């Protein structure tokens, strides 16, 4: 009796936010363990051909042996450079175009149909073209990454700047603020949370652009390795490269997420 | 008579003269919507003296906000003139402060930095204004909240920040477009009393738009009664009640009389159309 009483009393105590968070994290970890466990057991039991799906431990082993080799580091650096250049330049271009479209209505009137038309094209079709134009090396991959990455930044910058409340603009007019003052003091900070959502998407898109570019034609890079190992049926190594690419994307995303929270501190309360 | 130090101080800087501060001459506005002309405001002639508190009262569509926006120089006029100290108004001026129904604060700035924002826009050295900004914030009861962010404040407190923001740059004329309309009854009453205390002490001319008749009579030296379709001034009621005004005033027969006068002008045109 005494034991049941204690349990009841404990379960009635309301959980703190931290406890709930810890519980959710525990569930996530449990799901991960189950998936990895299945991944280990299913090929070992012969339910799936291990050539098509190598055991998880084999993938870990392949990853361990790959990352310590010099040639892998070279391929890694090549792709990372493409991603970063594509992301940074794509973001810069998207930001510049988005500002231009939002600030000058004439520019928007003239160019917006092209922007929408361009977005309607699945940009992967440009990959072979870019190789013909910019060559077999990194340039064509960076261009591919830029072309895929800039668009979300452009749209979000434009929408963010256009969503500045009329009252705020009127306040600035009543103070005889110059357009530049209004832009820096009101419009840009107001648009920042929306712009940042576009920047986060741009990072993911830059990774896709670089890899797709390498798939279509390259002699180096992680996308090239992925293609190579796939043709050689070294599926354990294919998975190892995928893990590395996922790590690049995840790390970049968390960095941006952290920056977002630092930069746009005033939004925090709304998210909770 | 508490906390009036900084406000009384900048009252001294206001030019003391009996010449009108604000004048409108045959001021009119016509909007063009879908090829049709809509008369928003018929010819308005007003003369407003220094330190006067004027309310504009009327139902929506009577053109009271249009009138205020034209006086502020925020809306181009169709015909007529707006004069501030005898000078035609073409665009907004630092001498005229505008306050909206919404506080319009920048959420990424602290209370103090919101109040200092106009000084930045005017190209003033912010550090020279900081002491005054803090003094004004104290006057509106926000002395302990200078480092708070807007989202941490109630609606009434946010509107106090907006009031401090406009008072800090010492406008001679304060244009207010239903400034406390979004607040609850109790907060609004408190804000009205505070607005009276501060602007009467500093001798600031106030043009106050509202659709609340009682509020208009209670606050004002004169009530401009406006009616819609087309928007026009239907009458101007003098309010010779003594100042400072207290809430008890509302129970006096003269107060009731005055509100009835305003109401009858408003009601008299309702059946006409």
Image (cartoon, coloured by chain):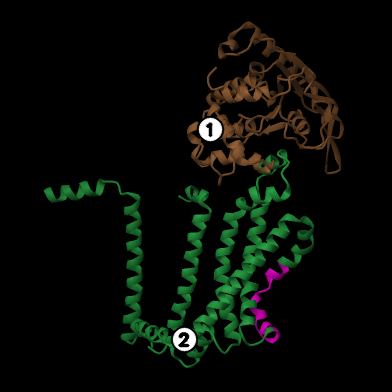
Chain colours: A green, B brown
| Residue depicted at 35% across the width and 70% down the height | A32
**Of residues B8 and A239, which is closer to you in this image?**
B8
The stretch in magenta equals A116-133
On screen, residue A152 above or below B64? below
Mark yes or no: residue B159 visible: no
**Gap in angstroms between the C-alphas marked 1 and 2:** 60 Å
Residue A72, horizontal then vertical, whole percent? 46, 86
Check disc 2 and report its element: helix, strand or loop: helix
Q: Residue at x 49, y 56 (%)?
A: A261
Q: Quadrant of residue B47?
A: top right
What residue sits right under mark 2 in the picture? A72
Label 1, residues with CA under 10 Å away: few <14, some 14-19, many ≥20: some
Horizontal arrangement in the rendering, residue B10 relative to residue B41 (left or right): left
Residue B115 in the magenta stretch? The answer is no
Q: Position of residue A99 (x, y in %)?
A: 69, 58
The residue that mark 1 highlights is B157
| A174 relative position to A193: left or right | right
The chain to which mark 2 is attached is A
Q: Residue furthest left?
A: A1
- Chain for disc number 1: B
At x 62%, y 24%, the residue is B9
Q: Position of residue B151 (x, y in %)?
A: 51, 41
Q: Is residue A128 magenta?
A: yes
| Mark 1: secondary structure | helix
Q: Is residue A68 visible?
A: yes
User: In this orientation, which residue lies closer to the viewer: A160 or A234?
Assistant: A160
Predominant secondary structure, magenta span: helix
């Amino acid at each position: 009796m005494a034991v049941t009483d204690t349990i009841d009393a404990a379960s009635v105590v309301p959980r703190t936010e931290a406890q709930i968070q810890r519980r959710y994290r525990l569930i996530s970890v449990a799901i991960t363990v189950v998936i990895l466990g299945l991944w280990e057991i299913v090929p070992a039991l012969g339910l799936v051909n291990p050539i098509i799906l190598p055991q998880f431990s084999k993938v870990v082993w392949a990853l361990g042996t790959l990352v310590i080799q010099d040639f892998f580091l070279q391929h890694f650096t090549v792709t990372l450079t493409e991603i970063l250049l594509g992301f940074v330049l794509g973001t810069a271009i998207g930001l510049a175009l988005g500002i231009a479209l939002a600030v000058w209505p004439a520019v928007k009137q003239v160019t917006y149909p092209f922007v929408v038309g361009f977005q309607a094209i699945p940009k992967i079709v440009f990959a072979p073209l870019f190789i013909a134009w910019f060559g077999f090396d990194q340039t064509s991959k960076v261009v591919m990454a830029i072309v895929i990455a800039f668009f979300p930044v452009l749209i979000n910058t434009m929408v963010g700047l256009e969503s500045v409340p009329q009252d705020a603009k009127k306040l600035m007019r009543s103070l005889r603020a110059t357009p530049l003052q209004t832009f820096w003091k009101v419009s840009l900070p107001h648009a920042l949370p929306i712009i940042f959502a576009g920047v986060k998407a741009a990072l993911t898109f830059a990774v896709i652009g670089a890899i797709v570019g390498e798939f279509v034609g390259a002699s180096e890079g992680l996308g090239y390795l992925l293609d190579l190992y796939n043709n050689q049926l070294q599926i354990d190594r294919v998975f190892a490269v995928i893990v590395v690419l996922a790590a690049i994307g995840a790390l970049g995303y968390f960095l941006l997420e952290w920056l977002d929270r630092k930069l746009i501190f005033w939004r925090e309360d709304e998210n909770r | 008579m508490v906390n009036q130090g900084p406000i009384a101080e900048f009252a001294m800087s206001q030019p003391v003269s009996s010449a009108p501060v604000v004048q409108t001459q045959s001021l009119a506005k016509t909007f063009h919507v879908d090829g049709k002309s809509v008369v928003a405001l018929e010819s308005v002639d007003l003369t407003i003296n220094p330190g006067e508190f004027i309310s504009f009262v009327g139902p929506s569509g009577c053109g009271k906000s249009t009138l205020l926006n034209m006086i502020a120089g925020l809306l181009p006029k169709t015909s007529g003139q707006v004069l501030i100290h005898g000078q035609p108004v073409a665009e907004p001026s630092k001498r005229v402060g505008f306050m909206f129904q919404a506080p319009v604060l920048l959420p990424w700035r602290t209370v103090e930095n919101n109040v200092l924002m106009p000084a930045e826009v005017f190209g003033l050295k912010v550090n020279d204004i900081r002491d005054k900004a803090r003094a004004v914030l104290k006057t509106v009861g926000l002395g302990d909240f200078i480092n708070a962010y807007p989202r941490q404040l109630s609606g009434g407190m946010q509107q106090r920040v907006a009031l401090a923001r406009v008072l800090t740059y010492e406008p001679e004329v304060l244009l207010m477009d239903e400034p406390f309309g979004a607040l609850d009854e109790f907060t609004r009453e408190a804000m009205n009393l505070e607005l009276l205390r501060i602007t009467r002490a500093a001798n600031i001319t106030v043009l106050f738009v509202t659709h609340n008749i009682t509020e208009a009579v209670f606050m004002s030296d004169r009530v401009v009664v406006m009616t819609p379709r087309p928007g026009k001034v239907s009458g101007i009621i003098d309010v010779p009640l003594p100042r400072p005004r207290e809430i008890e005033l509302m129970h006096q027969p003269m107060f009731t009389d005055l509100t009835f006068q305003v109401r009858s002008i408003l009601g008299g045109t309702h059946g006409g159309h």
